[in-house]
Amino acid sequence: MNEVAMHVRIANLRNDIVNSVDHVFGDHQRCASYFCAGAKEGEANIIHLLNEHGLYQQTKSLAGNLSRHSRSLLYNVVKNCVNQYNSAALKKRVASINYTKHGSYRALYAAVVLAYN
Ligand SMILES: [Zn+2]
């Protein structure tokens, strides 16, 4: 797995959220390569229709508001991973009488890691 610095991940998520409106409605000029491979066959760019009906700026504004939470969105994911790991560890600990009888928590935590992955 590629390790990407958290500040880069936050910036990428922010850009992806802001660009999501354009992506969904067929404008892929600002799509990141990891995010999108460009227009699908037969896909039309209908951003002009959103503009004609005054919806483009509204949807971009909503996406902008969401993008300002990119940091907390990513940190919540990390926190959820830790919580899931701890939850799995707790379940294994409760059901691990055999592990503890042998005095080895190493096997217990290896089992937890395998269960988590
Ligand atoms: Zn795209």
Image (tube, rainbow, N blue to C red):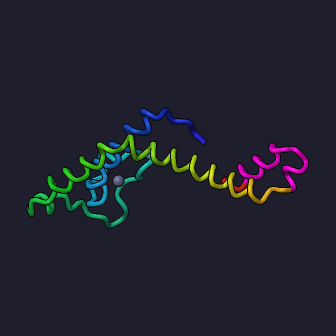
Measuring from the top left, give residue 103's x and y in whole percent.
88, 44
Classify the position of the N terminus by image quarter.
top right
Answer with left or right where residue 26 lies relative to residue 80: left
Q: Main secondary structure of the magenta part?
A: helix
The x and y percentages for residue 16 are 35, 47
In screen coordinates, is 47 left or right of 33?
Answer: left
| Quarter residue 55 falls in | bottom left
Q: Is residue 64 left or right of residue 117?
A: left
| Residue located 24% across and 48% down the image | 65
In the rendered image, the vertical position of residue 69 relative to residue 5, given as above or below: below
Q: Position of residue 17 (x, y in %)?
A: 32, 49
Q: Residue at x 42, y 50 (%)?
A: 35
Q: Nearer the viewer, residue 37 or 54?
A: 54
> What's the magenta region?
98-114
Q: Residue at x 79, y 49 (%)?
A: 108
Whether the magenta-drawn stretch holds residue 70 is answered as no
